[in-house]
Image (cartoon, rainbow, N blue to C red):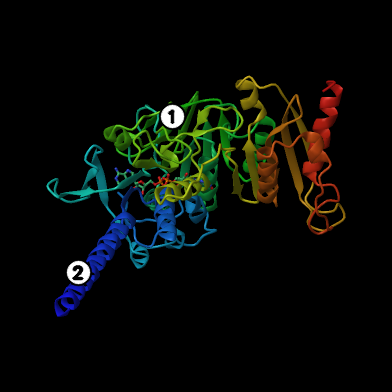
């Protein structure tokens, strides 16, 4: 009897021990599974958005961000507004310091360049900048996110290495430009896209004599049609900025520092040249890792996953799907970078999410003039073989009698079936919210006649009783009716 009792106790102890062992093992298993290690290369909008969103959805993941720059989490979009003085200091546009991320248990390694990825071993190597070549480190990852952004494209002309010739991409570029501009008098900005024009205006506000030169025959050729671009050109010229269109810059000359910019038959004496001539995605690391590269940049699926399943890529370094042309394209925008970071993060932690086709909604402000575009321009639609008409309106931003009403120009692009595929707006106020409405309209495949009948809010100090967007839609409907569509 005693023996049986002893045996029972013994069995119980054994059972308890087994339970303890099992629960310890399963706890480890859970911890092992949860504590994945994600390394993100790039501390720009895309990289930081990915890191923050992984942390938002997973308390335990080990997250490491490696960036070549000294600064992280700043807004390059605001650099021109520091030049103009609208934002006082460059420090104001740095939203967070690496220490802030440590509080969220995200480790940020600055001034360090990743130069090798061994995707078959899930390892990468980086070297700390400004130190001996020997200081190289290797770390492993479960998931890797490539968020390496883009670099400025500098056309292959002579003189781009002279002192006083600048690119504009990083915070440091902005600081160097501001210092140089502060001590000089004349500037030439090459490229009349958003960044070129915003920078030119900033330099003008600093007191420089500024010329903008663009090889195509209009301003903002990527997003606007020439009729809308002319309104902006008129404004900018009235602000005292000289514009040269239809001629590429041929040469920059000078002994040690820049002295002249040669554009067509014009020779401009200048103290500085800003090359705002576009960007090229940084795809080198992805190539080293063995990821597939598309026509423009790194290829990713709708989860932001590259051709290597545990490597994701986000931001200016990837190509995206265009909702209108149904082809791959680029979307070098801060908004795209942040949204892609969210999508990649969710998929990495196991939440299903898809990055949708883009409409490349953009908006800008130069002096008092706001302008923006979403979807396709008429020129781009025609270039892509899509038959379109446009509806236009020129109206006011408030009731006609209300003090301070400003002119507003709206252009809507529609297919011959009446589906709206693009919109451009130029005005001295309230452009962004109208464009965002149009972004929804285009994404939802709304037709001109549906838009013309939509309900909009109205009060004299805020809007017209018939919104300029509705007027443009009505104009498009009339044109479609005339065509018998
Ligand atoms: C002047 C200016 C104005 C702009 N205005 C607007 C605007 O008004 N609206 C808008 O939506 N967008 C605007 N943009 C575009 C927007 O800023 C970019 O689309 C966005 O910053 C892209 O983010 P990203 O993280 O992909 O790239 P980036 O911000 O370029 O970040 C890339 C990061 O990768 C790091 N990196 C690269 N290679 C390595 C490597 N080998 N090792 C380690 N680190 C590496 C870099 O150091 C950097 O931290 C503007 C851009 C500029 C320059």
Q: Position of residue 324 (x, y in %)?
A: 61, 30
Query: For the C terminus, which image quadrant?
Result: top right
Question: For the residue carrying disc 2, how many other residues have a C-alpha within 10 Å: few (<14), some (14-19), or many (20+)?
Answer: few
Residue 19 image point, x, y percent: 26, 66
For label 2, the SS is: helix
- Asked if 356 appears above or below 87 in the picture, the reply is above
Q: Quadrant of the N terminus?
A: bottom left
Residue 240 x %, y %:
60, 44
Kindly report which numbered mark, 1 or 2, lies closer to the viewer in this rendering: 2
Tell me the element at label 1: loop
Q: Farthest residue to the front: give it.
A: 1
Residue drawn at point x = 23 percent, y = 48 percent:
140
The residue beneath circle 2 is 14
Can residue 387 be seen here? yes
Between 395 and 287, the one lying in front of the other is: 287
Q: Quadrant of residue 479?
A: top right
First in sequence, mark 1 or 2: give its number. 2
Q: Do residues under tags 1 and 2 come within 8 Å of each other at their CB atoms?
A: no
Q: Which residue is mark 1?
A: 296
Where 27 sits versus 225, above or below? below
Q: Is residue 307 left or right of residue 200?
A: left
Give the residue displayed 26% in from the left and 38% down from the top: 119
Residue at horizontal 75 percent and vertical 24 percent from the top: 416
Q: Is residue 208 visible?
A: no
Residue toward you, 11 or 184: 11
Vertical relation: 275 (above or below) 251: below
Q: Residue furthest left?
A: 134
């Amino acid at each position: 009897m005693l023996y049986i009792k002893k045996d029972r106790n013994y069995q119980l102890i054994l059972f308890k021990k087994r339970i303890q062992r099992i629960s310890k093992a399963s706890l480890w298993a859970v911890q092992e599974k949860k504590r994945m290690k994600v390394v993100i290369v790039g501390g720009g909008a895309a990289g930081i958005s990915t890191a923050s969103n992984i942390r938002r959805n997973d308390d335990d993941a080990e997250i490491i961000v490696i960036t070549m720059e000294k600064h992280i989490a700043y807004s390059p979009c605001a650099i021109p507004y520091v030049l103009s003085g609208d934002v006082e200091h460059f420090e104001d546009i740095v939203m967070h310091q690496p220490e802030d991320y440590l509080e969220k248990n995200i480790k940020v390694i600055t001034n360090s360049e990743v130069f090798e990825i061994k995707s078959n071993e899930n390892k990468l190597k980086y070297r700390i900048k400004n130190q001996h070549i020997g200081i190289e480190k290797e770390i492993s990852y479960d998931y890797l996110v490539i968020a390496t952004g883009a670099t400025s494209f500098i056309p292959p002309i002579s003189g781009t290495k002279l002192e006083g010739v600048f690119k504009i991409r990083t915070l440091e570029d902005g600081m160097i430009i501001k210092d140089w501009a502060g001590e000089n008098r004349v500037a030439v900005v090459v490229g009349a896209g958003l960044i070129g024009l915003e920078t030119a205006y900033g330099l003008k506000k600093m007191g420089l004599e500024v010329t903008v030169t663009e090889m195509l025959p209009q301003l903002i050729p990527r997003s606007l049609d020439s009729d809308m671009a002319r309104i902006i050109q008129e404004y900018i010229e009235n602000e005292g900025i000289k514009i040269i269109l239809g001629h590429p810059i041929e040469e920059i000359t000078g002994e040690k520092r820049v002295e002249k910019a040669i554009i067509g038959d014009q020779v401009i004496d200048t103290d500085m040249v800003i090359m705002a001539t576009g960007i090229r995605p940084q795809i080198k690391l992805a190539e080293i890792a063995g990821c597939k590269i598309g026509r423009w940049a790194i290829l990713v699926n709708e989860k932001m996953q590259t051709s290597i399943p545990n490597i994701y890529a986000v931001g200016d370094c990837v190509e995206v799907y265009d909702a209108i042309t149904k082809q791959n394209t680029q979307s070098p925008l801060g908004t795209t970078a942040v949204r892609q970071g969210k999508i990649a993060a969710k998929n990495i932690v196991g939440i299903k999410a898809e990055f949708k086709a883009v409409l490349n909604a953009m908006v800008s402000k130069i002096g008092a003039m706001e302008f923006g575009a979403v979807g396709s321009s008429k020129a781009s639609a025609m270039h892509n073989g899509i038959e379109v008409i446009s509806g236009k309106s020129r109206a006011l931003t408030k009731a006609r009698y209300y003090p301070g009403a400003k002119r507003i120009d709206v252009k809507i692009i529609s297919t011959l079936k009446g589906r709206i595929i693009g919109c451009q707006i130029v005005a001295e106020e309230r452009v962004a919210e109208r464009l965002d409405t149009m972004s929804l309209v285009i994404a939802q495949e709304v037709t001109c006649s549906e838009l013309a009948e939509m309900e909009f809010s109205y009060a004299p100090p805020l809007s017209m009783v018939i919104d300029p967007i509705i007027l443009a839609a009505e104009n498009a409907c009339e044109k479609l009716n005339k065509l018998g569509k």
